[in-house]
Amino acid sequence: MAGALESLRKDLAGLRTGRASISLLEPITVDVYGAQMPLNQVGTIGVPEPRMLTVTVWDRSAVKSVEKAIRDSGLGLNPQTEGQTVRVPLPELSEERRRELTKVAGKYAEAARVAVRNVRRDGMDALKRAEKDHEISEDEHKRLADKIQGLTDARIREIDDVAAQKEKEILQV
């Protein structure tokens, strides 16, 4: 559950509101060599100026795949190719763009909630198996199930708080 929260924080750090940041492109995966690879394993990401990112692709044959992955990432970016370098100008944050970014942040938060719920489900299944195999009593099962539910509720509240804070930061002009 802590891993889901940490992953959410990392993903939200990539949603920059003002300046360009390398972490904006880090969650993107590229389809190259018949596999999905993180963008930072296909090329070097740089920030030459505050509103521009560049990706210097190491293999010339992967340039089109990198450009397509950035365009299809849902971040609203429009990359431009110059040889082995893909330039990614960051658009000014209009009100509409800020709304789009809050939707992306919401998707990240929902994915984290689902991950926490999956961990809860796995824990509950393990408790049921342990009770069925007579490793724990019915009372112990109930006590541990309540504890797992409490941890789940606490993590989901943390996820909601982190997401709300990021949405507030994005919408701030």
Image: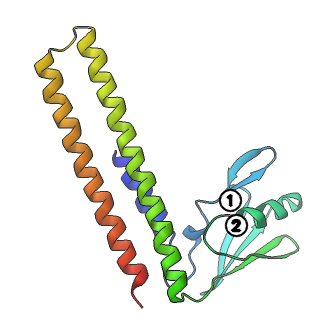
Give the residue displayed 39% in from the left and 74% down from the top. Answer: 167
Residue 88 on image: x %, y %: 70, 78
Q: CA distance from mark 1 to mark 2?
A: 9 Å
**Structure colour scheme:** rainbow
The residue wearing badge 1 is 39
Q: Is residue 74 left or right of residue 1?
A: right
From this viewpoint, which residue is outermost toward the left? 139
Location of residue 116 (image quadrant): top left
Q: Is residue 77 visible in this depiction of the protein?
A: yes
Q: Is residue 16 visible in this depiction of the protein?
A: no
Looking at the image, do the residues carrying marks 1 and 2 touch, with CB atoms under 8 Å apart? yes
Amino acid identity at mark 2: Ile
Q: Earlier in the sequence, mark 1 or mark 2?
A: 1
Q: Is residue 124 left or right of residue 7?
A: left
Give the residue displayed 53% in from the left and 75% down from the top. Answer: 100
Neighbour class for label 1 at 10 Å: few (<14), some, many (≥20)?
A: many
Q: Quadrant of the C terminus?
A: bottom left
The residue wearing badge 2 is 70
Q: Secondary structure at mark 1?
A: helix
In the drawing, what numbered circle is on residue 89? none
Residue 102 on image: x %, y %: 46, 73
Q: Quadrant of the N terminus?
A: top left
Give the residue displayed 67% in from the left and 69% down from the top. Answer: 45
Residue 57 against residue 76 in the figure, above or below: above
